[in-house]
Amino acid sequence: MDRTIDIHSCHKDDLWEMMWSPYDAETYRFVLDQIKPDDVVFEIGAGDLRLSRMISQICKHIYAVEIHRSVLENSGIYIPGNLTVLNLDARVIPFPKGISVGVLLMRHCTHFDLYA
């Protein structure tokens, strides 16, 4: 099977996501092990909501922020009741009240100090 990708035919956001996700199972497991049932989670760079959906099975509520609408549109239709998806730029929005855990899994992030 040829796994070559023609980068000229890819949408800008699709190419970006192919470069940086998904993560391996060990990384996801590490994150999930940090989440407790009472947690309200704020995930920055939620991508296709893969991790957000997993976290939603454990926590009280999760806010998943993804700036790229096209990535969210390709994430499927199932959104659990305790998952709020925000198509916004996390660098400039106020965080919701009551956040107990922040998740930022972006290998390419160079501005994480903006979220502190």
Image: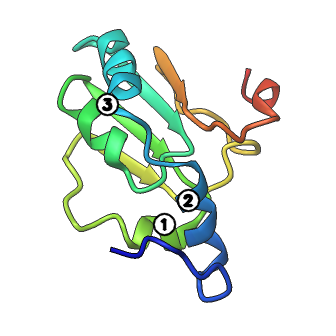
Name the residue type under label 2. Glu
Q: Residue 104 location in percent, x, y? A: 57, 30
- Position of residue 43 in the picture relative to residue 60 (left or right): right
Amino acid type indicated by mark 1: Val
Which of the two residues, 99 or 49, is positioned nearer the viewer here? 49
Q: Residue at x 32, y 74 (%)?
A: 1
Mark 2 vs 3: CB contact within 8 A: no
Residue under pointer 1: 71
Tag 2: Cα neighbours inside 10 Å, few (<14), some, or many (≥20)? Answer: some
Say whether residue 67 is left or right of residue 77: right
The residue wearing badge 3 is 25
Q: Amino acid at mark 3?
A: Ala
Rendered image: mark on residue 17:
2
x and y percentages locating residue 4 in the rendered image = 51, 74
Examine the image and state in which quarter residue 95 appears.
Answer: top right
* Residue situated furthest front in the rendering: 1
The residue furthest bottom is: 9
Circle 3 sits in a helix, a strand or a loop, which is it? Answer: helix
Label 3 crowd (10 A; few <14 / some 14-19 / many >=20): few
Q: What residue is rendered at 53% in x and 60% in y?
A: 18
Q: Nearer the viewer, residue 4 or 65?
A: 4
- Can you give x and y, in whole percent of width and height, for residue 75 in the image? 34, 64
